[in-house]
């Protein structure tokens, strides 16, 4: 990583470990009350990258989190559907991810 990317990665890690859900010195105890809705801010019109943190309780079927939809060289969805059988998600209910502008 170049210096700026390393600093950004370190900052992201610090933000994650500072969240209440990450505390390891205490068991997470639901309070029973909902969190307040954060104040909405107008968009600034500049590009940004976001960290998306998912806290899942219970089991997660990781084969159904990111399901192949459309691949240029090989029909990965057909292969997925064949392996998953009756529990495969239908292609019509999938939401495609546009990664054409990604450089990673």
Image (cartoon, rainbow, N blue to C red):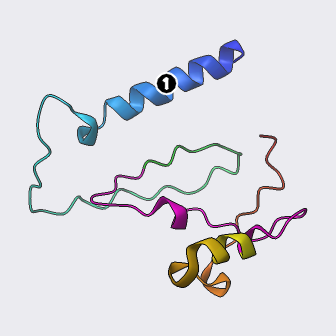
Q: Main secondary structure of the magenta part?
A: loop
Residue 61, picture quadrant: bottom left
Q: Which residue is mark 1?
A: 11
Looking at the picture, how far across and down is residue 41, in whole percent?
Answer: 49, 55
Furthest-right residue in this view: 73
The residue located at (66%, 87%) in the rendering is: 92
Looking at the picture, how far across and down is residue 94, in whole percent?
Answer: 63, 77
Which sits in the foreground, 47 or 8?
Answer: 8
Looking at the picture, how far across and down is residue 31, in whole percent?
Answer: 9, 55
Does 66 lie within the magenta span? yes
Answer left or right for 74 relative to 61.
right
Against 90, residue 84 (above or below) is above
Answer left or right for 14 relative to 70.
left
The residue located at (9%, 62%) in the rendering is: 32
The residue located at (25%, 42%) in the rendering is: 21
Furthest-top residue in this view: 3
Which sits in the foreground, 102 or 35?
Answer: 102
Q: How many marks?
A: 1
Which sits in the foreground, 12 or 44?
Answer: 12
Tag 1, which secondary structure? helix
- Quarter of the picture containing the C terminus is top right
**Residue range corresponding to the magenta coloring:** 54-77
- Quarter of the picture containing the N terminus is top right
Against 61, residue 52 (above or below) is above
Which sits in the foreground, 69 or 20?
Answer: 69
Q: Callout 1: 10 Å neighbours few (<14), some, many (20+)?
A: few
Does 103 lie within the magenta span? no
């Amino acid at each position: 990583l170049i210096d700026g990317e390393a600093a950004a990665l370190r900052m992201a890690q610090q933000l994650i470990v500072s969240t209440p859900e990450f505390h390891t010195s205490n068991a997470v105890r639901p309070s029973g009350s909902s969190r307040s809705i954060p104040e909405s801010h107008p968009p600034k019109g500049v590009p940004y990258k976001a960290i998306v943190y998912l806290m899942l309780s219970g089991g997660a079927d990781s084969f159904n989190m990111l399901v192949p939809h459309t691949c240029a060289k090989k029909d990965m969805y057909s292969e997925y559907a064949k392996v998953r059988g009756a529990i495969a998600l239908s292609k019509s209910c999938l939401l495609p991810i546009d990664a054409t502008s990604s450089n990673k």
